[in-house]
Image: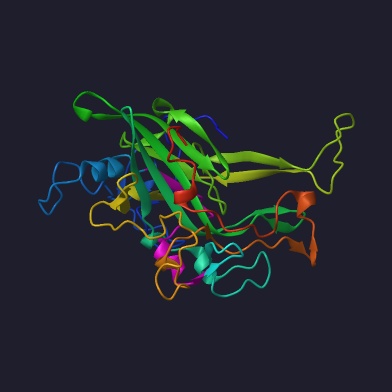
Amino acid sequence: ASDGATSTSSSGGVETGGSGGGSSGDATSGDATGGATSTGDPPTTGDTATTGEPVDPRLEALATYAPRVWLDKDEEYFPSSVEFAFASMTRFADGEGKFWIRSTDPLESPSDTLPFFGGDLESAPVYAFYADKGGGVVDLVYFFWYPYNRGKSVVDTIWGNHVGDWEHITVRLMKGPGDELTPIQAYLSAHSFGGVYEWVEIERYQDTHPVVYSAWGSHGVWSTPGDHVYMSIGETDPVFDVCITLVCTDLTDVTSAGIAWDTWERVAGFDYFAKEGLGGEVWPVWMSDQFTDPGADPIDVPGGGPIFRWGNEEDCSTLGIDISDLIGVCRLEDGPTGPISKDVWGPELK
């Protein structure tokens, strides 16, 4: 999953800290990337905020190292706040009593889309977690929420769609003398895998912000623009080099420097192990693994309790026939698990 990282940007895109789904925003200044830029700087750069109140050093670290995410130039399915999506979703219990959320309006087909799938970049925060893992290791985990993941076209059919999409990167810091924090590595997630990069390998903006590229539609996170083959489906005869299954093809993520999402301009910060919000945030009720907890009444309100899966249930049918075993993926996959379920809270960098 790891493509080579670069030290300079080759962008010609439009930079914005969040300007609405599909919008490029107002470009007001330039930087070394060659693209138009926003004026966005970290919300705090010293020991006090503009109000004169002391700045929580955990929140300051989260803002300092928050990434610039380049959304693809043709992106249609933008990030948003979870609240934006919740307005069009319903919470329900599955057969095991675990609570999911799904679109309130049903999908007419596995590739059907709804208006809220387009997201709302202007409302989108980065959900950023400060995780002191002991031994001098501090991980800053940045989660991006998209209301929809568009799949890949195989034999004129879209496979691998799912309602709801969580992606993340992690920046690893080490404590030095006086608890000074120094970045040493970063992890970029792409689908169900990812790659670790040394800090010196990662492209950066203003020295501290990792620059990453979000794939069109599926939002896998990569270190460079371009085409990234992440999976091959089907089986090829090793002797005759011909496909011996229904289909053989590569699944490819496409990234480009289209619209820059400067996530430090809207950080929803939390301390994972303290289970507390930072800078006025409240610890989310959905950051709980008690998935059978009904939560607040009425229980069908998405923001009222824990969430096991963040999207509709799978639909593997094609013309009423399930051929997912032949392809290896359903047309509509189950919604993803949320941040609380991700394998990022242990000692390993993930």
Position in image of residue 27 (x %, y %): 34, 53
Whether residue 103 is situated above or below residue 61 in the rendered picture? below
Position in image of residue 332 (x %, y %): 66, 60
- Residue 72 included in the magenta stretch of the image: yes
Residue 14 in sight from this viewpoint: no
Figure label count: 0
Position in image of residue 265 (x %, y %): 30, 52
Q: Nearer the viewer, residue 312 or 108?
A: 312
**What residue sits 77% from the left and 54% below the top?**
155
**What residue sits 89% from the left and 29% below the top?**
239
Q: Which part of the image, by quadrant, shows the N terminus?
A: top right
Q: Nearer the viewer, residue 261 or 2?
A: 2
Q: Quarter-wise, where is residue 333 in the image?
A: bottom right
Q: Quarter-wise, where is residue 266 in the image?
A: bottom left
Residue at the extreme left:
52
Position in image of residue 250 (x %, y %): 71, 42
Magenta region: which residues? Answer: 67-91
Whether residue 227 is situated above or below residue 266 in the rendered picture? above
**What residue sits 48% from the left and 38% below the top?**
188
Position of residue 43 in the picture relative to residue 342 (left or right) = left
Residue at the extreme top:
177
**What residue sits 54% from the left and 47% below the top?**
215
